[in-house]
Image (cartoon, rainbow, N blue to C red):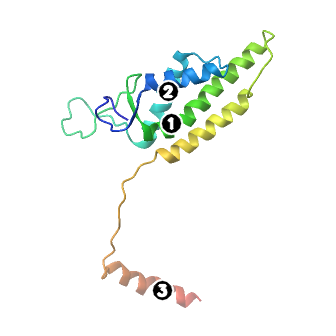
Amino acid sequence: MSTTSTDAHHVIGSLQDAAEELYEELVTTGSSVMLTDVVKIMIVNTKKYAGWSGELQHCPKDDASCVKPLLVIDASTVLGVDDWLIIEPVVRAHCDLVQARRMEGAQNLGVQPAGMLSSEALQYYKDSLELMKREAFQCQPFSVEVPENNALDEFFKDKFWSTTWQKL
């Protein structure tokens, strides 16, 4: 995720661009979700993704030692392809939830409901969020080296093993 198009090598475009593509697809399937709704949904869920992936960090304005400034997420934020692949199912599920709620609201006006119930769509959205939480977690690979001659080994060997074997 980036605030400029030059920071990422493989980009899907801005959140606005991705929302417009998704909106065009949704309109052809009969969805009542509007472009402004899709943009808001993109921003909300991208913020969640960025928070879970560790992309957001608040740095005070007067702190020059801050390595990673606060990332502002709006419609112009550029989204990488790898980020979009993680966020897209959540955005689609959120759009389905908005559509389902609208259909249930329109039912009171005599419109015949179609598609998912809002309870089904809500569960689908929650499941998508949980999956995104797991996929968003990023950690650089690391290794742990244990020294050959560790003083704690002797401590535990003497204390732990002797008392354990005495009890058996």
Whether residue 40 sits left or right of residue 147 in the image: it is: right
Whether residue 50 sits left or right of residue 90 in the image: it is: left
What amino acid is at disc 2?
Met
Q: Which residue position is annotated with label 2?
A: 42
Marks 2 and 1: CB-CB under 8 Å?
yes
Cα–Cα span, label 3 and label 2: 57 Å
What residue occupies the far left of the structure in this picture? 64
Q: Which residue position is annotated with label 3?
A: 161
- Mark 3 vs mark 2: give the one in front: 2
- Number of residue marks: 3
Q: Quadrant of residue 128?
A: top right
Of label 3 and label 1, which has the lower sequence position?
1
Cα–Cα span, label 2 and label 1: 8 Å
Q: Which residue position is annotated with label 1?
A: 87
Residue drawn at x 68%, y 31% is: 121
Cα–Cα span, label 3 and label 1: 50 Å
The correct choice, above or below, for 75 with respect to 11 in the image is: above
Of label 2 and label 1, which has the lower sequence position?
2
Whether residue 102 sits left or right of residue 79 in the image: it is: right
